[in-house]
Amino acid sequence: MSKKLLIAGNWKLNGEKKDISFIKNLVKFNSIKLSKNVDILICPPFTMIDRFCQLTQRSQIQIGAQDCSEHDFGAYTGEVSANMLSDLNASYCIVGHSERRLYHNENNNLLNKKILNVQKNNIKAILCIGESLLDRRNSKTLRVLGNQLNGALKNNINPNLLEIAYEPIWAIGTGLVPDYSDIEEVHDYISNKLEKLYGKKSKKIRILYGGSVNSKNVFQILSIKNVGGALIGGASLKIRDMKSILKQFI
Ligand code: PGA
């Protein structure tokens, strides 16, 4: 596939001032090893987005958020809007991570509103979808993913500002990875589904894989047909791991 890969780090609830050295280090690494084949994205907590955006300004590295509000502004204590993210120059926002769906009861209708809001602010949405272990055991994986896509991608979502991340819930943070043939089956399914929804424009949408990606398995996973990148949690927190992942594609 000729699409550029997207390698994205999801820092979750990790990251303090001392971790600014990570991004400085990554910028230095990237300026030595400029990559034509990979887009590099780091999604730190909200508190670090501004600083990270400033530090990466003259680099190829992009900065994104892990979530945002479905609202633009107003009396919503604790929320951060897509407009605020755009004000800081964030270029991506993860939407519907399974931890948000699980711990914050986020459903497909809400995620649809969030995607629309993100895109309205010219930010790319990375919609996460994934099945539970029970779904997989009951052979419901494709049905569950299909419902998640149908529910979140209604109301004129812009395919030019969209990426999908397939993250089996049971693979996140567990060290378990599906059989590569299963990843291929799911990515084929998502790719066909996107083609039905968006025709030729679907070809621009990258379908990332996420769930226990590390420097040892990333190359093989990203060689699977229709896998357009990786969403990486744990292994994206250590600069050494990130560099050894990126080196394989530069
Ligand atoms: P993991 O997390 O790489 O630590 O499994 C991935 C994610 O939750 O996006």
Image (cartoon, rainbow, N blue to C red):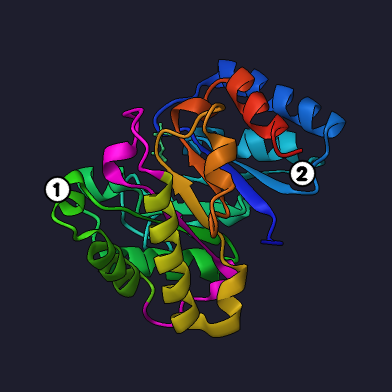
Q: Mark 2 sits on what residue?
A: 60
| Ligand 1 shown in quarter | top left
x and y percentages locating residue 23 in the rendered image: 67, 27
Q: Amino acid at mark 2?
A: Gln
Mark number, residue 194? none
Q: Earlier in the sequence, mark 1 or mark 2?
A: 2
Mark 1 crowdedness (10 Å alpha carbons): few <14, some 14-19, many ≥20? few
Q: Quadrant of residue 114?
A: bottom left
On screen, residue 236 versus residue 245, left or right, reads left
- In the rendered image of this protein, does residue 21 appear above or below residue 227? above
On screen, residue 168 versus residue 244, left or right, reads left
Residue at 58 percent across and 55 percent down: it is 228
x and y percentages locating residue 247 in the rendered image: 72, 30
Range of residues picked out in magenta: 154-179
- In the rendered image of this protein, does residue 33 appear above or below residue 138? above
Q: Amino acid at mark 1?
A: Leu
Q: Mark 1 sits on what residue?
A: 134
Kindly give the residue lying farthest to the right in the view shown: 32
Residue at 39 percent across and 82 percent down: it is 155
Query: In front of the other: label 1 or label 2?
Result: 1
On screen, residue 127 versus residue 226, left or right, reads left
| Residue nearest the observer in this picture, 53 or 103 | 103
Residue at 33 percent across and 63 percent down: it is 111
On screen, residue 163 versus residue 98, left or right, reads right
State how far apart marks 1 and 2 are (Cα).
40 Å
x and y percentages locating residue 207 in the rendered image: 51, 58
Question: Which corner quadrant holds the N terminus?
Answer: bottom right
Mark 2 crowdedness (10 Å alpha carbons): few <14, some 14-19, many ≥20? some
